[in-house]
Amino acid sequence: MATYVIGDVQGCYQAFQKLIRKLQFDPQIDHLIFAGDLIARGPDSLAVTQWVLEHKDSCSAVLGNHDLNFLAVTCGLRDPKSEDRIQPLLESSICDSLIEWYRHCPLAMDLSTHGILVVHAGVWPGFDRETLMTELNLVHQALLSNTWIDSLASIYGNKPAHYNDAISNNDRIRFLINACTRMRFIDASSLALDFDCKTSPDMAPSHLSAWMDIPRRIAIDRTIVFGHWATLNGARYDQQFIALDTGCVWGGHLTALRLEDRQRIQVPTYG
Ligand SMILES: [Mn+2]
């Protein structure tokens, strides 16, 4: 019996199946937690999500930016991006079931028995764990409510950059979604989110830091397990942070973390 967290699959079905075989995954006793971005840029998002829905009793996921974008596209709030390959998914018979499944997914999972917190992009350094999990309930309830499409319509935009500047509930939801699903860099003095910098952490301007390197971040009493940042390529693997996006969709690797012993298990995308 094992629990695995799996990095960004991004529609790479073949690599995903290779990883499942390597894990000797048994749906009767094992559990998979996806760290977000199950779908989008890879060749077969439909096969990935079909598999997940067929095994949904043994799968959980936190939402990534591409998962949320899929929901927005299905509601007609966004046009599909040309580089996303989700058209077969939009036209498939499982589309409605997938929308329902995604609406039940949280932005973060706090796994106290394993001392792990799973989130797609990261934890904003101004949040302690309890505040984060309490605030995220607002997003979870919004996605489950009858007015979920209205909430989703308001998530686009980079402001507010700081949680203290969130006035309305929609501001709070937008900030929480941006922080949990898109964040990479943060202004080290103000803790404002920065979405302009697209470099690797060592090339960033001096006033910015990678979110996990902010010196005055509030300590989180969990190991934060995250995906989203493929250029880190799994370089963070310690007591505080474990980076799981190893660039599967860019021809790198797909990585799983076994929570019982914190071992990483990888397969290459090709070969
Ligand atoms: Mn992402």
Image (tube, rainbow, N blue to C red):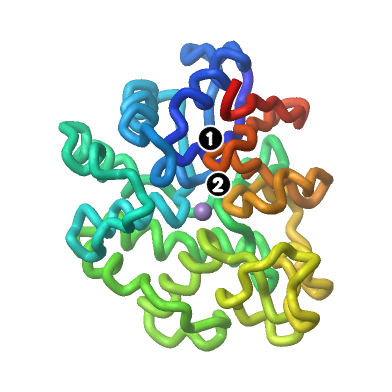
Of residues 228 and 145, the one nearer the viewer is 228
215 vs 110, left or right, is right
Could you say which disc has been placed on residue 33 in the image? 1
Of residues 137 and 225, the one nearer the viewer is 225
Q: Secondary structure at mark 1?
A: strand
Could you say which disc has been placed on residue 159 in the image? none
The residue depicted at 35 percent of the width and 57 percent of the height is: 69
The residue depicted at 63 percent of the width and 50 percent of the height is: 230
162 vs 84, left or right, is right
Q: Is mark 1 within 8 Å of ligand 1?
A: no
Q: Quadrant of the C terminus?
A: top right
For residue 9, above or below residue 64: above
- Residue type for callout 1: Ile
Do the CB atoms of the residues marked 2 and 1 lie less than 8 Å apart? yes
Residue at image mark 2: 109
Q: Quadrant of the N terminus?
A: top right
Q: Residues within 10 Å of mark 2 (few under 14, many from 20)?
A: some
The residue depicted at 18 percent of the width and 34 percent of the height is: 92
Q: Nearer the viewer, mark 2 or mark 1?
A: 1
